[in-house]
Amino acid sequence: MRLDDARSVRRLEDVRFLTGRGRYAEDFTLPGELRGYLVRSPHGHAAIDGIESAAARQAPGVLGVYTESDLRADGIGPLPCIAQVNTIDPLIVPPRYALARGRVRHVGDPVALVVAETRDLARDAAELIAVDYRPLDAVADAAAALSPGAPLVWDEAPGNLCYRFQRGDREATEAAFAQAAHIVEIELINNRLVPNPIETRAAIGSYDPAEDCLHLLLTGQGVHGTSAGSSPNGYSACRSNASRSWHPMSAAASA
């Protein structure tokens, strides 16, 4: 069907959702399954001066408590940037780690991960973790972030500028404006859009020692990109020689 075709397109996924046959990550339970719970930042911008997790490690049912130091010790690098833009100057890609390293930069920034036998036990242990935050000035408006003296979000991006994008013929455009009888300026503000799925992003990972393979079941799209990103050539989150990801919501799989 052409993009300019105005006819309605019959959806294929509605029947299973409307009849209660939809499948979500919560519907899957693997043998010996454990639960992970994230401790997230309550601050928009703050330095992390210390994390005390001894009490959480001793809590009932807890098998592990992890912070960025554990990721660093295991050689797990930053998350890859999949949005490549054709920019004037090189695109600045700060190192974003799965768990905050030294500083949090938005409310909800993951700081620690608790792995326990059940979700409730993981949450109870997470509440025992004490994070010593030192609040820093924050900026939430994109235009204000580019103002001189605005709080710096990433040291790697001076002036909070990630990239500059340009398209078209500059000389022809400037000539057209120079010859124009009138020039009208308008400032457009794009609304921030936030999707609200029925189930939040979730993932279930299981390692198969016989195949030396990580099986990953998760919600979301881009199954092939996810498989490539979790391979040893991606961001080093997978130690095995292979990974297989399955997205039940999109009925796709990748090896």
Image: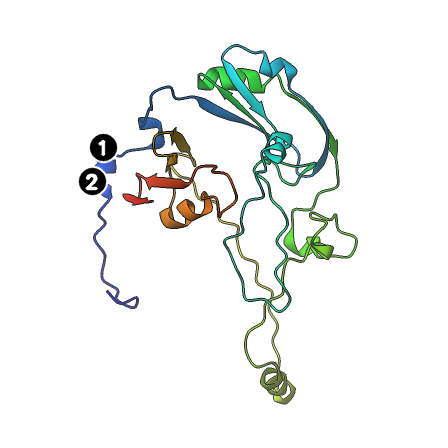
Residue position marked by numbered label 1 in the rendering? 21
Q: Residue at x 56, y 11 (%)?
A: 59
Residue position marked by numbered label 2 in the rendering? 15
Q: Amino acid at mark 1?
A: Arg
Horizontal and vertical percent for residue 140? Answer: 65, 46
Q: Residue at x 23, y 56 (%)?
A: 9
Camera-nearest residue between 219 and 253: 253
Q: Residue at x 38, y 29 (%)?
A: 209
Q: Amino acid at mark 2?
A: Val
For the residues labelled 1 and 2, the Cα–Cα distance comes to 8 Å
Camera-nearest residue between 18 and 241: 241
Q: Is residue 151 left or right of residue 13?
A: right
Q: Residue at x 39, y 41 (%)?
A: 242
Question: Which image quadrant: the C terminus?
Answer: top left
Pointers 1 and 2 in contact (C-beta within 8 Å): yes
* Residue at the far right in the pictured view: 149
Task: Residue 4: give its label.
Answer: none
- Judged from the image, the secondary structure of the residue bearing numbered disc 1 is loop
4 shown above or below 207: below
250 shown above or below 128: below
Horizontal and vertical percent for residue 82? Answer: 50, 53
